[in-house]
Image: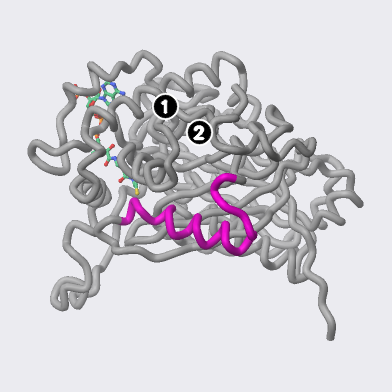
Amino acid sequence: MARTLRDVVFVDGVRTPFGTAHGALADARADDLVVKCVAELMRRNPGLPPDRVDEVAIAATTQIGDQGLTIGRMAGMLSGLPKTTPGYAIDRMCAGAMTAVTTTAAGIAFGAYDVVVAGGVEHMTRHPMGEGIDLNPRIVAEKLVDPSAIVMGQTAENLHDRFPGIGRKRADGYAAASQRKTAAAYAAGKIQHRLVSVATRSPELGWGLVTRDEPVRPETTAAELAQLKTPFRPHGRVTAGNSAGLNDGATACLLAAEETARELGLPVGMRLVSYAFAGVDPEVMGVGPIPATDKALATAGLTIDDIGLVEINEAFAVQVLAFLDHYGIADDDQRVNPYGGAIAVGHPLASSGVRLMLQLADEFRERPETRYGITTMCVGIGMGGTVVWENPAWQGHSASNRAGDSAA
Ligand SMILES: CC(C)(COP(=O)(O)OP(=O)(O)OC[C@H]1O[C@@H](n2cnc3c(N)ncnc32)[C@H](O)[C@@H]1OP(=O)(O)O)[C@@H](O)C(=O)NCCC(=O)NCCS
């Protein structure tokens, strides 16, 4: 049987505001956060009949309790999708939602689905990092990985060791800039339209409505950051200020075959070009985006010079800076995280991959001179993931994608 691969498009995406662990969303259920996102996607896209959704893939790193019971299936039903729409759960830690997108996108290209919901959630209040893990003793006994590989902050310290040119000052400068960029994006109303508000009820505070990301600290200065403790190593360089925090939140997006999007009159936010995941030494997991990006670019027949926008997850400033140094991109290059990143808005692990995509889709609209962009992230236990996207609004001036030519 002959098959033709189909083009896959990112139609639309939303997320909850991200909360600080033990903060605004502490009393919300993780699955309810996903439901808010899926229901909002359906509300915003009335041209999509619910029975045309062929799959719901939702990622979570800790798949127990309200993040368990194959959360994609549960969230689909709770969102009002028909019981005939299946769903499942995905885990690739921080790249969970990214993997939900790439896996279901491959299914669309293959012809197994026309339209899917893909997303992720992590409620780090209810499910702290490492909850319930049962590390195989061989990992330590056979020295398969350095013990520091299990603590993400320690892997970031290891990265500082490996790249002595990236010191505390540079990491703090990058972190302060991320906060500034996020504050500017909020002030310009560039983030709010992707957020679905979450009603909360706390025994102490009563009813509330969460409409903004809680972790953002727009007043942050590099001088203040320089005073913070280094919890992962005495006299280290990684701090609460130059890392993403511990957060609660969910994301979801709609993907479709381009022909189905056209048939249903759905928007085409981005076109999928290629994707790749790569493994690296777990004790320096932060370098993962580099081989993943090389692989994804090679598959697409592109080079980094063709990439006009980079949405890189800021698990730690050092890991972003290692990526930028590798490709010869300046710390303040305007192609990189124009709306700021996880250091400011937070990183509810398995949800973040789709947050990067929401931002890239919006940035593409603002920059029709940019043809290609990437979303990329590092992953615990030593991996990286990168997705290359094409801007449907591209007006054909590809030269302006080149280094140094980026628009404001
Ligand atoms: C780094 C980490 C341990 C800090 O946790 P924490 O101590 O609970 O963090 P807090 O938010 O309480 O911040 C610690 C201090 O820094 C201060 N701080 C944090 N960000 C700041 C900023 N931008 N500006 C100024 N001060 C800041 C806080 O106010 C707090 O000060 P205090 O001790 O006087 O109250 C935690 O966020 C972490 O583990 N992050 C990494 C998460 C991770 O590994 N994700 C996966 C990636 S692969």
Mark 1 beta carbon near ligand 1 (under 8 Å): no
Dots 1 and 2: beta carbons under 8 Å?
yes
Up-down relation of residue 149 to residue 244 (above or below): below
Q: Which residue is mark 2?
A: 337
Number of callouts:
2
Q: Would you say residue 352 sits in the magenta stretch? A: no
Q: Which residue is mark 1?
A: 178
Up-down relation of residue 107 to residue 331 (above or below): below
Q: Nearer the viewer, residue 299 or 74?
A: 299
Q: Is residue 181 left or right of residue 360?
A: left
* Kind of residue sitting beneath label 2: Asn
Q: Would you say residue 289 sits in the magenta stretch? A: yes
* Kind of residue sitting beneath label 1: Ser
Mark 1–mark 2 Cα distance, whole angstroms, equals 8 Å
Up-down relation of residue 246 to residue 58 (above or below): above
Q: Which x, y percent locates residue 247?
A: 39, 38
Query: Which residue does the image show at 44% across and 22% down from the upper left?
Result: 206
Using the rendered image of the protein, determine whether residue 336 is visible from the camera's viewpoint.
yes
State the SS at label 2: loop
Query: Which residue does the image show at 79% across and 35% down from the upper left?
Result: 395
The part of the chain drawn in magenta is 285-305
> Within the image, what quadrant is residue 8 found in?
bottom right
Q: Which x, y percent locates residue 40?
A: 69, 38
Q: Main secondary structure of the magenta part?
A: helix
State the SS at label 1: helix
